[in-house]
Amino acid sequence: MQALPVFLRADPSTVRQWIADWPSQFVWFCVVSILLGAGCYGLVIGSWRDELQAVYTGIKLPMVLLLTSVGNGLLNGMLAPLLGLNVTLRQSFLLVLISFAVTAVLLGSLSPVALFVIWNTPPLTGLTRLWSVEYGFLQLTLATFVAGAGIAANMRLLPLLRKFSRDARSARNVLLAWLATNLFLGSQVAWVLRPFIWDPAGPSQFIGRQYFKGSFFETVFNAAWRLIHSF
């Protein structure tokens, strides 16, 4: 527990030492943080529908973060040297894993807030449609929480990136590149696994075939458009 405040602050000197030593217990600490933090948030999200969906979502959201961590670790490991960041592929992967672990801890802390929002939103029933106001509102709210936690976690890494880069500008460029890859890869992984966007007219299911069609951005844009035109 004493290491948790240091971890959340992403103290540059301490985290840089962790990255250099690559302690296995720290890697597992990050993985467990993702499982617990994102799992709690996923349970809350799925509870809008029913208990089964809560279990499914509690499993799928940590999967989204872990799969995105692996994919972005590889992508960012190739991008970082081109943008002036002096890190190896393994160090890049651990940096990405740290950012997602902090994201998951923040999401876990936001779970009571998300539960309050869901509690005060009309329940999801067979009458709820994709164009319903409450459906679009909850889509955007829960997705905004995830995006906000992800941006905050990556911003905590900026002082650390400066220690690995030639100058502050290179560190900012790397951070922006990492945020972009997190957005595009993470959103599409989330679209396929569908941890917080589902069809209210269909049954509770882990992954449906229909989820391989369309895109995350199209759905979010449509939800925002419907919500704006409802006022």
Image (cartoon, rainbow, N blue to C red):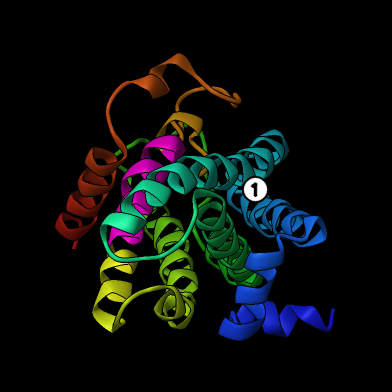
Whether residue 166 is situated above or below residue 209 in the rendered picture: below
**Of 153 and 128, the residue lying toward us:** 153
Q: How many marks?
A: 1
Q: Which amino acid type is marked by label 1?
A: Ser
Is 124 or 20 nearer to us in this picture?
20
- Image check: 146 left or right of 179? right
Q: Is residue 197 visible?
A: no
* Relative horizontal placement of residue 167, taking residue 11 as reference (left or right): left
Q: Is residue 133 or residue 35 the one in the foreground? A: 35
Quadrant for the C terminus in the image: bottom left
Answer whether residue 15 is magenta in the image.
no
| Residue at image point 50% right, 49% down | 89
Quadrant of the rendered structure where residue 101 is? bottom right
Q: State whether residue 31 appears in this view.
A: yes
**Residue 185 lies within the magenta run:** yes
Query: What's the residue at 18%, 59% (across, down)?
Result: 228
Where residue 23 sits: x, y (%)? 77, 61
**Percent x, y of residue 96:** 51, 57
Q: Position of residue 131 (x, y in %)?
A: 28, 40
Report the residue marked by disc 1. Answer: 47
State left or right for residue 182 relative to residue 204. Answer: left
User: Magenta part of the protein: which range?
Assistant: 177-190
Q: Is residue 59 above or below residue 170?
A: above
